[in-house]
Amino acid sequence: MATQLDLKRRIRSVKNTRKITKAMELVAGARLRRAQARIEAMRPYADRMLELMAGTARASTSVRGLPLLQRREVQTVAIVPLTGDRGLAGPFNAQILRHAIALERRLRGEGKTVVWAGVGKKGQSALRFRRYEIGAWWQGFTDRPAYSDAQAIAHRLAELFSEGEVDQVYIVYNHFESPLVQRVTEQEVLPVAEHLLETDEEERAEDTLRGDFIFEPEPEEILARLLPVYLETELYRALLESAASELGARMTAMRNASKNAGELIDGLTLAMNRARQAEITQEILEIVAGADALEG
């Protein structure tokens, strides 16, 4: 049975741990608010990018020759999981890796070759532990991604696709719903889906009312420049969603850890009080026994 001194030491240790988890929860909460603001600021830009691409595509005579739109027989697929550089974020990293590995098994079952690329130290170490061969990997910015990070990833993926080393690219990331909910999302980013460039009849009618536009240079050339920027934008949005999801998952995990630490402290305090009461009772019994012996 643990002594009173042992219980005091455990209570002190758990209290120190609770201070750390509480501080981590507060830091994650403050950074989460900034991450949400970045996502909200990003969404109008992404929507405007799609509108601009669709308008340029309508003016193009043909978009079939653009490299990032080329659809060919899929033989090699690149999977890009967006994980974190650190742990202590609940199931954030594990659910991404589970989904990515399940996708890899499904693709291999279809007879396709899978190439791994991705973001985050946790994903890299987990895949290496499972003896997967890893290609391009990026890390060191998962909690605060910059647009330049998305540019570097997009440039490499576009290069692999344009050179025919991969025929399809999927990213797997956590889409931020709320601090309590992060939804695993699987998105095909290459080739760029042509339906994104399509418009409905209402939008075509609006363009007719606005009049004709003169493009300089040609619409096809403009679209060829816009497609890589669209890829960068999509990756940047996914990185922001992943960063916010990681902070939300960490805040929730640390809040649960602080709560569990408080319950453990209460249980240890109760056990310590019982141990102290037992020691007092034992001392009283020894005094009474000694007094009886002297009287005898």
Image: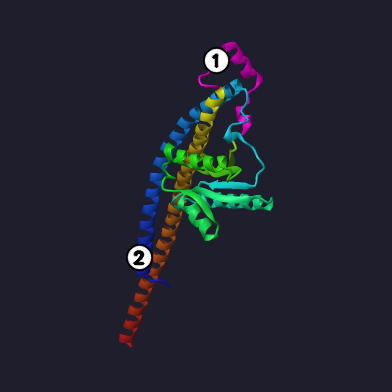
The N terminus sits in image quarter: bottom left
Left or right of residue 85, residue 78 in this image: right
> Mark 1: few, some, or many residues within 10 Å (few <14, many ≥20)?
few
The C terminus sits in image quarter: bottom left
Q: Secondary structure at mark 2?
A: helix
Q: Nearer the viewer, mark 2 or mark 1?
A: 1
* Count of numbered labels shown in the rendering: 2
Magenta highlight on residue 150 = no
Left or right of residue 265, residue 291 in this image: left
| Cβ atoms under marks 2 and 1 closer than 8 Å | no
Foreground pick, 194 / 274: 194
Instruction: Name the N-terminal-most of marks 2 and 1.
Output: 2
Inspect this view and state whether residue 183 appears. no
Residue 169, position as x, y percentages in the image: 58, 43
Q: Which residue is mark 2?
A: 9
Q: Which residues are magenta?
A: 192-218
> Residue drawn at (42%, 55%), measured in percent from left and top?
262
Inspect this view and state whether residue 228 appears. yes
Give the numbered dot on residue 213.
1
Foreground pick, 59 / 278: 59
> Residue drawn at (44%, 34%), measured in percent from left and top?
38
Q: Relative to 39, say whether 25 is above or below.
A: below
Q: Secondary structure at mark 1?
A: loop
Residue 268, position as x, y percentages in the image: 42, 63
- Amino acid marked by disc 1: Phe
Looking at this view, name the residue that lies furthest to the left.
Answer: 294
- Amino acid marked by disc 2: Arg
